[in-house]
Amino acid sequence: MNNYYNEIKNELINYEVTKKVKKYSINKSELETKYNVGKLLIEAQGGEKRAKYGNGLIKEYSIKLLKETGLKYSESSLKRMRQFYLLIQKGAPLAHQLNWSHYQ
């Protein structure tokens, strides 16, 4: 009887650990992607100083992404990715327990 309990307990513990690892991996991937997109947007706009005036490019990219790939990334979501990159560049801690909605 006790042996079954231990097997059940181990199965459930393994499942919970796997869930946490998967969640961490997805969160990490999401933050890395949005950081990289923000960086590329800054570079495409000619650097941080010129990026403020490059919102037309972000609007263009948003429209092209939707037309060419069906990906719905609004102008404001791309701007948030750009801001996220700038925030991290200025030394904000990138804690693994935070997710994209925390940074928004």
Image (tube, grey):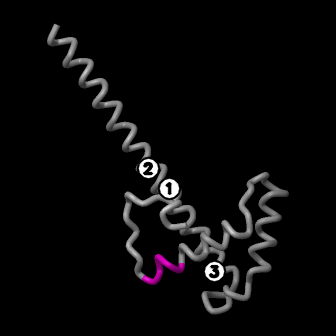
How far, Cα to Cα, is label 3 from label 2?
26 Å
Q: Residue at x 77, y 77 (%)?
A: 57
Task: Find out whether residue 87 is within the magenta segment.
Answer: yes
Q: Amino acid at mark 1?
A: Ser
Q: Residue at x 38, y 57 (%)?
A: 97
Q: Which residue is mark 1?
A: 29
Q: Which residue is mark 3?
A: 42
Q: Quadrant of the N terminus?
A: top left
Q: Which residue is mark 2?
A: 25
Crowding near pointer 3: few (<14 within 10 Å), some, many (20+)?
many
Earlier-in-chain disc, 3 versus 2 = 2
Percent coordinates x, y for residue 38 in the rendering: 60, 72
Stretch in magenta: 86-90
Compared to 39, does 12 lie above or below? above
Q: Amino acid at mark 2?
A: Ser
Crowding near pointer 1: few (<14 within 10 Å), some, many (20+)?
few
Q: Quadrant of the C terminus?
A: bottom right
How far, Cα to Cα, is label 3 from label 1?
20 Å
Residue furthest to the bottom in view is: 49
Percent coordinates x, y for residue 94 in the rendering: 40, 68
Q: Secondary structure at mark 1?
A: helix
The disc label shown at residue 21, or none: none
